Image (cartoon, grey):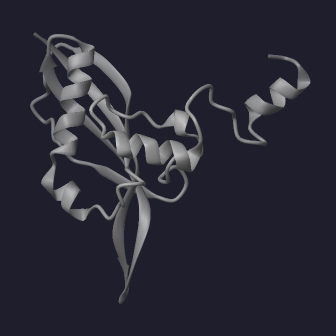
Amino acid sequence: MKTFRVLVLGRNFLFAHIDGKSEAVRPTGFYTTRFVTADDATAAEYQVMAAIRADEKLRSALRNPRTDPPIMVAEELEEVPSIPDDASESYVFFTGKGAERPRDITLAAFPDDAPEDIKEAATRRYGKTGKATPPQGSSESKKDRRGDA
């Protein structure tokens, strides 16, 4: 068994935010770092994602409809010598830019065991999966127009 550190980015988690006396549901993102022991990197990633999905506090706060699921991606995954003594399972939440769902469905990674109706609804809403098209005005799309690709 090996020990892994996995940095996870969560996006499009719809949570109720209370501002004074009013409550509004807004897209929220988070980062969390988890440490696990597993046979390989793939098993470590699966184990971390399953643990986050099973987090009852996180699940009970969600306001997402089934057709607009939250998204999680392992941003970094590395083998480490051991689990640090001060390792925690905390989250760093944020709102605003980057907290909402990606514009292109190809940026959203669905787990293999995601329900087919969720994948189908997302595909209907955002288009077929395939090569991601950079948003207009991005540096990649400007480079392609110049022919520097």
Return the residue nearer the eye: 62 or 34: 62
Quarter of the view holding residue 9: top left
Question: Would residue 60 appear left or right of 27 to someone viewing this image?
Answer: left
Q: Is residue 97 visible?
A: yes
User: Disc count in the image?
Assistant: 0
Residue 83 occupies which quadrant of the picture? top left
| Quadrant where the image shows the C terminus | top right
Left or right: residue 102 compared with residue 80: right
In the image: residue 42, left or right of residue 3 = right
Picture quadrant where residue 116 is located:
top left
Hey, which residue is sitting farthest right in the picture? 146
Question: Could you say where residue 143 lies in the image, as x and y percent from the top left?
Answer: 82, 26
Residue at image location 87% in from the left, 28% down from the top: 145
Assign the N terminus to one quadrant of the image: top left
In the picture shown, does residue 97 fall above or below 104? Answer: below
Place of residue 66 in the rendered image (x, y in percent of width and height, measured from the top left)? 35, 55
Where's residue 8, x and y in %? 33, 36
* Point 27% across, 17% down: residue: 42
- Which x, y percent locates residue 72? 36, 39
Task: Determine the residue positioned at 24% across, 63% down.
Answer: 61
> Residue visible at 18% across and 28% down?
47
Residue 34 in sight in this render: no
Does residue 101 lie above or below 61 as drawn? above
Residue 29 drawn above or below residue 141: below
Q: Left or right: 125 with respect to 143? A: left
Residue at the bottom extreme, as displayed: 21
